[in-house]
Image: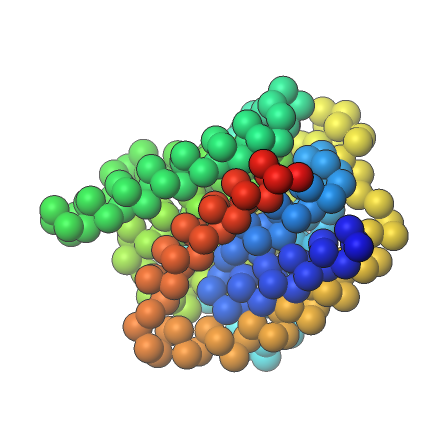
Amino acid sequence: MTVVLAAIGVVAGAALQSATGFGFSLVAAPVLFAAVGPKPAVGALIVVGTFTSVLTIATEGRRPQPLRREATLLLGWALPGALVGVVILRALSAQALQIALTVGVVLALVLRHTTRRVVERPTPRWAGPLAGFSSGTLTTSTSTSGPPLVTYLLGRGYEPGAMRDTLTVCFLALNPIGALALAVTGTTDAVPDLTLLAVLIPATALGQLAGRPLFARLAVGGSYEPVLTGVLLVSIAAGLIATFTS
């Protein structure tokens, strides 16, 4: 039953990421954290997260067009953040990690909403480094690196296609960065179970394929940003519920 629930979470997360460019770990992580514990869950999410990003880039029949300068900035700052995330993973409980993630996402959404209501202005220079560092930290502590990246890119005002491709490229690079950080710090208990991966990888492919038709509708209909904001709010609520009822 635990494996079945994990597979359902992965299907839903992969479909969401295929449709919006992020959300895989936000949906799948709470289930896996409850099923196998934080460290093995982070390892498993790194593997299947890489797989869904590869599917997005390699099987959609088009050439991705990420924002290269933004991706380079974010990933450069994610490197030291990933090492900090390992320290946090070892030191804090699953409940504490989920609370920290929730507080960070809520504050980011409040700041984004307040800034847009007051005046539209460019994001400050420190926003990119902070988003990259935070994303790297979350990669190895909770495997939910999306919120800082989404908040930053939304603030820059990029169109949905470029934003989705940039997120995909960032996630594709963040997962190996996270795996490397876990390896060099000797966090061997994060190595995922092969039997679990044998179930989760096909589930990831199923979800990724299911989510593809949804992106075109969101981008054309002008509902891309509201949907992303809604997903963030729902996912952090679900994460808190799963953490404290497990």
Q: Position of residue 140 (x, y in %)?
A: 62, 35
Q: Position of residue 95 (x, y in %)?
A: 58, 31
Q: Is residue 57 visible?
A: no
At horizontal 77% and vertical 51% (from top left) the residue drawn is 2
Task: Please indicate whether residue 50 sits to the left or right of residue 183 in the image.
Answer: left
Q: Position of residue 90 (x, y in %)?
A: 66, 23
Q: Quadrant of the N terminus?
A: bottom right
Among all residues in the image, which is located at the extreme top? 91
Specify the quadrant of the image occupied by residue 207. bottom right
At horizontal 49% and vertical 51% (from top left) the residue drawn is 235
Task: Please indicate whether residue 49 sits to the left or right of residue 123 in the image.
Answer: right
For the residue pair 213 and 185, the one nearer the viewer reads as 213
Q: Position of residue 110 (x, y in %)?
A: 28, 42
At horizontal 28% and vertical 37% (from top left) the residue drawn is 125
Report the coloring of the rendering.
rainbow
> As displayed, is residue 177 above or below residue 4?
above
At horizontal 77% and vertical 25% (from top left) the residue drawn is 186
Q: Is residue 195 visible?
A: yes
